[in-house]
Amino acid sequence: MAEAIVSVALELLDSILLPTAGFIGEQVRLVGDVEEEVDKLKNNLQAIQAVLLDADQKQMKNKAVRVWLNRLKDACYDVEDVLDEWKTEMMKLKIEGGYVHNALAPKKKVWCLFPSPCFGFKEVVLRHDIAVRITEINRKLDAIAKEKGGYNLNVIPANERPDYPPMQTTSFIDVSDICGRDIEKNNLVRKLLCESSEQSLQTISLVGIGGIGKTTLAQFAYNNDEVKSHFNSIIWVCVSNLFDEFKIARVIIEALKVPTPNVEDLQSLLQCIHNSIVGNKFLLILDDVWNEDHKKWEPFFHCLKNGLHGSKILITTRKESVAYIMKSIDIINVEGLSFDENWLLFRSLALSKRPTHESEKLEEIGREIVKKCKGLPLATKTIGSLLQFKRNRDEWQRVSGSEMWKLEEIESGLLSPLMLSYNDLPSSIRKCFSYCSIFPKDYRITKDELIKLWIAQGYLGIEKDTKLETIGKEYFHHLATRSFFQEFSSHFGDAMGRCKMHDIVHDFALFLSDGECLAIEVNIGDNDLFINSSNKNVRHLMLKVNKEVPFPMSICSVKSLRSLVIEYVHSLSSDVFPKLCELTCLRTLKFTTYFFDQEVMEIPKEIEKLRHLRYLDFNRQFITRLPENLCELCNLHTLDITESMVTELPGGIEKLVNLRCLKNMTRSLLYIPKGIEKLTGLQTLSEFVISGGNDYDSRACSLEGIKNLNNLEGSLRIRGLGNVTNVGEGKMKEALKNKKNLTGLGLQFDKGTKSLRRNHVSWKTFEEGESCEDYEVVLEALQPPPELERLSIYLYAGRTFPSTWKTSLTKLKSLCITSCPNCKNLHPLRELSSLEEISIYWMESVKKMDNEFWGIESGASSSSSSSAFFPKLKQLKFWGLDEWEEWTYENTKKGEEEEHIRFMPCLATLHISSCYRLKALPDSLLQRTTLKKLMIWGCRILKERYKEGTGEEWFKISHIPTIENWY
């Protein structure tokens, strides 16, 4: 880990010196012997770096080495701060001199550190201060370098260092299947299904050390078919260290599918549970329970007794005392896997992808390694995931013979395999892993957010040929393939977009961070206890401040903080934020809010002091304005104001030359300021707002301004298209067409304060003097990006859609049309051959859907594949079509067998909601064998027509596997 910090400092130093090579001359001597001190700094760091791999390994058994490494890390953090200030001042002079607009854009001129011997007195003083600080750091490093000789640290040549495999690009290997445990599984299921005549509510406990497989057994029970059919409700709650009664109660209520009461007292929540479980046989699984205070559990236990006889509670815990406190009648002690079971698990990970002759050579060593895992599934998964990338016998032998197997500091038998896997990581990835301990246990980590946090700390290096986000994804995948992450879930289409860390892995990461990372929760009575000997070294802090607790001001005295993530249920008082701005080493400042009953939070002008800041997140904060001083943060790469109340962005936004991510999806923003077009390195821009008022026209950027933002990727929403008046000269077509990485686009045709307004369920007509053609011309002029996969259109008042779509939207998979009052047909859509999903909301001019509506009559007449309409469509959704009465479909090719299947031949899901007048659905669609799910919500006529058992046409849909029909 120390090696990674030294590497960051050296890379930052090189990034400063290389652009100024040849220019350090007379100007430099104005501020002292900077050149000599910088050379000395670099030599010191390189000399120390050479022995750090050996030091990292020896520190586990030699506390003196660990103390030495901590002193080295402190000095390197100082180096980073000084060099970053140096680089920041260089950048500001460039900006002020007009030498650069965006960090990723081509530079206009070559620029040196000191452009003229006549630069101002302020700059001389600043550079003198930097020179003095570098000299002081060198003194510290001199002492640290001399000490290294006393620890017998060896230089490990490059050819003797571990041969790290390249970053893997294959999909993550699923290691969650249970190997063996047949006795435990059968025993657990039997106990859960057993009906007792004595107690109406029974508690069963799975007890064992961390990593032994308790949660896996509980997950098996949760997904077991017999168990699922036996209970009316199965509820899973991850409890973890803190027994949060409110969280547990709300999760139970949500799982019972009853409205969550808007109350803050525990009594009301428990009363809701008590009333909701009457007549309900439930299974409540409480995973990872630590609570030993029976007073916290008893109210739940008495409340839950109101369920049906035979209800059960299953808990997993490391402490048998917890099982007794929670009134367990059965305690299942989860032991380690047998050798054979553990070997099967290991072999499936480490040997399954190899040819037989290779596996046979490694099997003997593999069996010895499995013995050292002591039956712990997590240890076996970790070491097996490591060895799947080791190709030869010598590498396996080195792992088997490692001294690391003698380490036992975290939990019996687990530190050794974790440390072996950790030491096998490149140093750059090690730091990324230990940083994850900033999150509390059981925290659901979002991959994209984590990567941005890594970038903010400089862990992914300085951007060269490969995008930092790409490197971050590779690092994440590297950690995932070695089982450092688990419980993956989808997030915005990414199957591995979210994950968790096993609590033992979290403990390990916390152990490695050595006090640098901390997650704490502040309750009433302990709000000012942050500063103590146990957290004096903290540099990355996640702080949760509960309701009615004052903000712990002692945090503002920890000047070394580089990450501060605040979860606070109220707005910060006006005197807190200026104090936070004294934390001038911060690279990350993030606010998270759970409640919206806040006062407006003011951002003070002192925010400009946070000169190192890279990541600033005001997501869901009650902020109405951002101060102009924010634009002094020229290192900022991520700014998130999603769901805030911000109405205007700072006018000097072009000075944020390193900005690569602007998340500004907010309903309150009135326009995008001029200058945004100069930030050509922007990769994320959530929303572009076109000004709708003369008051802002002089400050607002027109839509044509985004023409050069060709690095944009992901999704973009354009709001205020109803304000566009000039679509001539081809400017509109240039706005979007070259954005090759843009895959999602939202087009909203509102007019800001003059937008179409919804009155109950109908839309008022647009303003006098406007015509449908005005909207059609704008939509036609917007040439969509070539790789577009998702398109949403809102408040469009045109009558039809562009005919050119069939050639320009060849990769479109999802289309959503919302509140388009004049559209009466979808003719141009029929030839979008890649469409998989269509959603239509509130098209109030539609009264009848027939062949003409879909454009079928004007379609191809041949029987070739080109005659298929919506050939790949899988999901079709309608919502709120108030005037819609008829939906018919006629086969226009009489006599051609099965020709009707050429219309939406792959349709699997049909969803009709709040279409009050619709009388029937087309038989040809309902009879499809491809149709797997039919949802009819809030449609009175359809509900009666297709009602199970009694509906006159129930027989037409009874074959569909999943049907939801309610009103």
Image: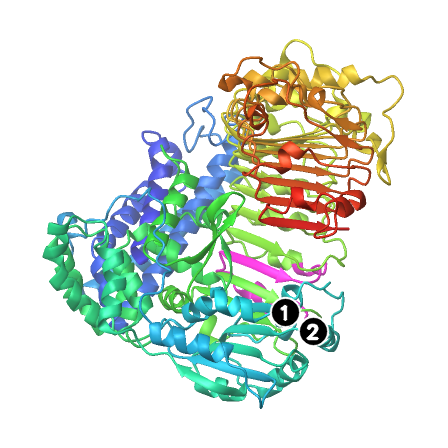
Image quadrant of residue 337?
bottom left
The N terminus sits in image quarter: bottom left
Residue 698 point in image, percent of width and height: 75, 24
Residue 556 among magenta residues:
yes
Q: Tell which of 238 and 671 is nearer to you.
A: 238
User: Relative to residue 441, is residue 424 depicted above or below?
Assistant: above
Image quadrant of residue 17?
top left
Q: Tell which of 94 and 225 is nearer to you.
A: 225
Q: Earlier in the sequence, mark 2 or mark 1?
A: 1
Which residue matches tag 2?
Answer: 273
Residue 769 point in image, percent of width and height: 87, 17
Span colored in magenta: 549-576
Q: Tell which of 430 and 307 is nearer to you.
A: 307
Image quadrant of residue 115?
top left
The three-letter code of the residue at mark 1 reads: Ile
Q: Residue 281's mark? A: none
Residue 861 point in image, percent of width and height: 58, 12
Which residue matches tag 1?
Answer: 252
Write the residue at 78% across / 47% down.
Answer: 944
Q: Is residue 839 visible?
A: yes
Q: Which element type, helix, strand or loop, lies under badge 1?
A: helix
Color theme of the render: rainbow
